Amino acid sequence: MRRLYIPFILLIVLLLVPGALAQPPAAGPLYRATVSGTLTAVSTGYLQRALHLAEAANASALIIELSNSGAVLSEARAFAGEIAAAKVPVVVYITQGTESGAAGALFLSAAQIAAVAPGSSFGSPSPLTQVDAALSQQTRDMLLDGVARQLRDWNAAHGRNTAWIEQAVRAGVVLNNQQASALRPPAVDLVAASSAELLTLLEGRQISLLDGRSVTIAALGHTVVEVSPTAWESLRLALADPTLAFVLLVLGVIAIGLEFAAPGTSLFAGIGVVLLLAAGLGLVVLPLRLWALGLLVLALALMAGEFVAHTHGALAIAGMALMTVSALNIIDPAQAPGAFIAVWAIVLVGLALATFVALAVWLALRSRQRPVTTGQEAMVGKLAEVRQRLAPDGMVFIDGALWQAIVDGEAAEPGEWVRVVSVHNLHLVVRHLDAPAPVA
């Protein structure tokens, strides 16, 4: 009987073992990173860290949620290449209401799964690549062909539409979620209204990685690990916002100007230096037009000079006009499409500066109209007691001191009160009280 059991046991083992060997290993957690604002070198540095963490943890997938508005093209293209070569599936998700611009088009093309939300769009009205105009036309065409071919290969490898890419690279194109889904085949893989719906749609999807491996995403019932920016990354991400950097720059120059206007405490100078350093950290990662940057420096110098020269607002008005022109043109749209200084910030800064300068001019004019309250001129109009007979010169007592005086009119006797009408060479000119008051 024992011999009869052996074939059955062997049969069961042969049936179970292949199934056990074929069972995939337990999937790792999902990682998620979120990017908002202008995509710069600071943003891609944060995303690189998130990708390395996901690869080290053998994550089921890395989800990159884009809520950005504008991007530095060179940084976006470089990180798109890292997405395409990732060792774990990368899901790029354009959140609801986001105009993701050039970064969205590049990241979606490189991603293993391209997902968008309703009301979102990707692509730029300007070309997705910038070629040096000094190159020959043949060289420029070759470079553009290379970028277009790379984007087509990425999309074609994942079964997505490639018809829009040629125009996007050379002239620019913007696709919203409906247009991208309506193409045949679609330009995106998924349309999800929320992050929760995205996880549901990702469950069980098979992905082919660049190294040839096939991976199945396990999204439901698994922990989503949020990769948050470090404190230093958070600070730099905030400062990289063009609008904030501009406001800090203007405030820093104003603080330096106040220090020159009221030297001694060094308080304004310290605040100004800190603000200028913070603005510099933000501007250094943005592609700036040198002529506009020089114009901005000149504008700020003129406004700061107003606090020193006191030209009744002339320098400040010229500075504000130059500042407006500079702020509208300082970021190169060819290298960073969608990145700009908000018009509302320019208007608010201009109004605040105009109000501040107008108040300073008003206070200066008002102080000039006030009567002098210190020095010899402050004695004009005051009463003095005659201590030595004025015939016409003598001594008077005023403000606790004896002064040489000359009477304008008849002689004045000791004990008599007279009025000071002017001061000449340390001599007071006085008149009798019943004499007509001097015209101011």
Image (cartoon, rainbow, N blue to C red):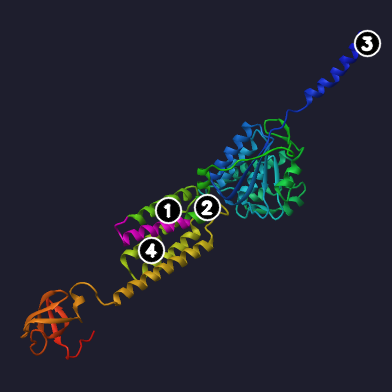
Disc on the earlier residue, 4 or 3: 3
Q: How far is mark 4 from mark 3, CA to CA? A: 101 Å
For the residue labelled by badge 3, is the local secondary structure a helix, a strand or a loop? helix
Q: Which residues are magenta?
A: 246-265
Q: Which residue is mark 1?
A: 275
Mark 3 belongs to which amino acid? Answer: Leu
Q: How far is mark 3 from mark 1, CA to CA? A: 88 Å
Q: Which residue is mark 2?
A: 241
Q: Nearer the viewer, mark 3 or mark 2?
A: 3
Mark 2 belongs to which amino acid? Answer: Asp
Residue drawn at (59%, 41%) of the image: 47
Disc on the earlier residue, 1 or 4: 1
Q: How far is mark 1 from mark 4, CA to CA? A: 17 Å
For the residue labelled by badge 1, is the local secondary structure a helix, a strand or a loop? helix
Residue drawn at (8%, 86%) of the image: 413
Q: How far is mark 3 from mark 2, CA to CA? A: 78 Å
User: What crowding class fits label 3: few (fewer than 14 Cα within 10 Å), some (14-19), or many (20 or more)?
Assistant: few
For the residue labelled by badge 4, is the local secondary structure a helix, a strand or a loop? helix
Measured from the top left, where is residue 5 in percent x and y? 91, 12
Q: Which mark is residue 152?
A: none
Disc on the earlier residue, 3 or 1: 3
Q: Nearer the viewer, mark 3 or mark 1?
A: 3
Viewer-nearest residue: 132 or 311: 311
Q: Nearer the viewer, mark 2 or mark 1?
A: 1
Measured from the top left, where is residue 402 in percent x and y? 11, 75
Q: Are marks 3 and 2 in contact (CB under 8 Å)?
A: no
Q: Are marks 4 and 3 in contact (CB under 8 Å)?
A: no
